[in-house]
Image (tube, rainbow, N blue to C red):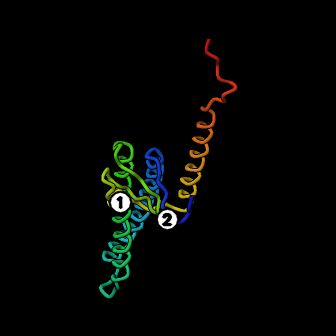
């Protein structure tokens, strides 16, 4: 298997990986939301307690940065959760691993960017090791299912 090329993935392997990616995106969303709320509270306390010569631009900047990153993390979690549901329910969908990107395709082999998502190197190694283990198991099963001619039962 080529590590930099595209690798076809079984549908059953996508849902657990997508759940892990969605969980990580939800954690990022929670942390950035807490940071955003902290800066909002800090900005409100500055408005209430400080004299009018204060500088609110810095606090507003961080509210915007953490707010946007929170929204992006929530959108990523929703997209990956939808991909996990699609992998679990739709039989006609195919999944391909290209680099660190899991690409979804419909039954006509058209890519679905709304269900595609990035994974980490660790999850990529896990998916590739699962692929090699499945390939070796299927090779063992096919060799075990063939019966040698000397062991075949004789017909009477």
Residue reaching furthest to the front:
156
Label 2: element kind: loop
Residue that carries the numbered disc 1 in the rendered image: 74
Residue reaching furthest to the right:
150
Location of the C terminus (image quadrant): top right
Residue 112 in which image quadrant = bottom left
Nearer to me, 62 or 112: 112
Nearer to me, 62 or 105: 105
Q: Residue at x 38, y 63 (%)?
A: 73
Residue 50: image location, x then y, percent = 34, 80
Q: Is residue 108 left or right of residue 134?
A: left
Location of the N terminus (image quadrant): bottom right
Residue that carries the numbered disc 2 in the rendered image: 99
Q: Which mark is residue 96?
A: none
- Mark toward the viewer: 2 or 1: 2
Residue 75: image location, x then y, percent = 33, 61
Residue 16: image location, x then y, percent = 47, 47
């Amino acid at each position: 298997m080529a590590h930099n090329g595209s690798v076809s993935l079984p549908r059953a392997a996508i849902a657990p990986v997508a759940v892990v990616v969605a969980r990580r995106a939800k954690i990022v969303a929670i942390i950035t939301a807490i940071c955003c709320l902290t800066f909002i509270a800090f900005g409100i306390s500055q408005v209430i307690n400080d004299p009018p010569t204060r500088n609110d631009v810095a606090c507003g900047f961080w509210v915007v940065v953490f707010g946007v990153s929170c929204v992006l993390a929530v959108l990523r979690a929703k997209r990956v959760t939808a991909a996990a549901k699609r992998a679990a329910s739709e039989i006609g969908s195919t999944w391909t691993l290209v680099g660190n990107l899991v690409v979804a395709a419909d039954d006509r082999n058209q890519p679905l960017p709304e269900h595609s998502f990035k994974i980490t190197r660790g999850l990529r190694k896990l998916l590739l090791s699962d692929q090699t283990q499945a390939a070796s198991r299927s090779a063992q099963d096919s060799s075990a299912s063939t019966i040698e001619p000397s062991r075949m039962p004789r017909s009477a």
